[in-house]
Amino acid sequence: MKIFRLTFSAVICAISVILLYISAIIPSGKVAVFALATGMLCATVIECGEKFAFASFVVVGLLSFFMLPNKLILVPYAIFFGFYPILKLHIEKLNKIVLEWLIKLLSFSLAMLAAYFVVGLIVGQNMKVEVLPYFIPMALLGFAAYDYALSLFIGFYKSRISKYLKK
């Protein structure tokens, strides 16, 4: 059982690093690639548990730091996308839909704010403040769609894929 979890999480780490590398070299579609990388970590949470998923998040972050040509790609992964599957697991254990969504939207907003300042420090400039009132609602709507799609993926994975893996 432990060998399966170690092997599975190692394969997921490799796939996630490849996905992040792809997001570093393609001109568009980066959010879709981040979503795929998050889906990979969701599979790790399901098959191996949150400890292996957290370790995978750290390993992917470290490997990507040394391998990616564009280090800015790591900011959204490190600040939000990488640990969101674990966070989502804990939030959805509350079984109170309104509270769950409030926590999810708040956590995404805080991560977005952190990314805003981190990227500003690295690049040396931030988005103009006048744009934020338009950007924030659109980002929150995008996040809600992302979370819903991630839930659909998790359901699909549990019902169609997980049962075929030897554990």
Image (cartoon, helix red, strand yellow):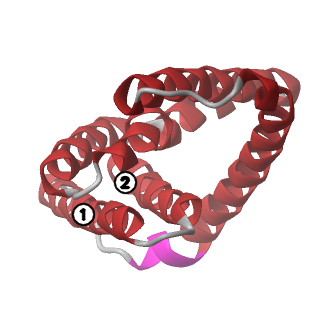
Image side of residue 48 versus residue 36, left or right: left
Q: Crowding at label 1, few (<14), some or many (≥20) Cα neighbours within 10 Å? A: some
In the image, what residue type sits under mark 2? Thr
Q: Quadrant of residue 139?
A: top right
Mark 1 vs mark 2, CA separation in Å? 7 Å
Q: Position of residue 115 (x, y in %)?
A: 50, 29
Name the amino acid type tagged 1.
Phe
Mark earlier in primary sequence (1, 2): 1
Q: Vertical placement of 36 versus 113: above or below?
A: below
Residue nearest the viewer, comparing 133 with 20: 133
From this view, report whether residue 5 is shown above or below residue 72: below
The majority secondary structure of the magenta stretch comes to helix
Quadrant containing the C terminus in the rendered view: bottom left
Residue drawn where x is 25% and y is 43% of the image: 61
Magenta residues (range): 160-164
Q: Is residue 130 magenta?
A: no
Q: Which residue is mark 2?
A: 44
Image point (67%, 33%), residue name: 92
Residue ID for mark 1:
8
Seen at 15% across and 50% down, the residue is: 63
x then y, percent, for residue 78 = 38, 36
Vertically, is 152 above or below 136?
below
Front residue of 69/37: it is 69
Give coordinates of residue 76: x percent, y percent.
Answer: 46, 41
* Percent coordinates x, y for residue 95 in the rendering: 76, 29
Q: What is the secondary structure assignment of the residue under circle 2?
A: helix
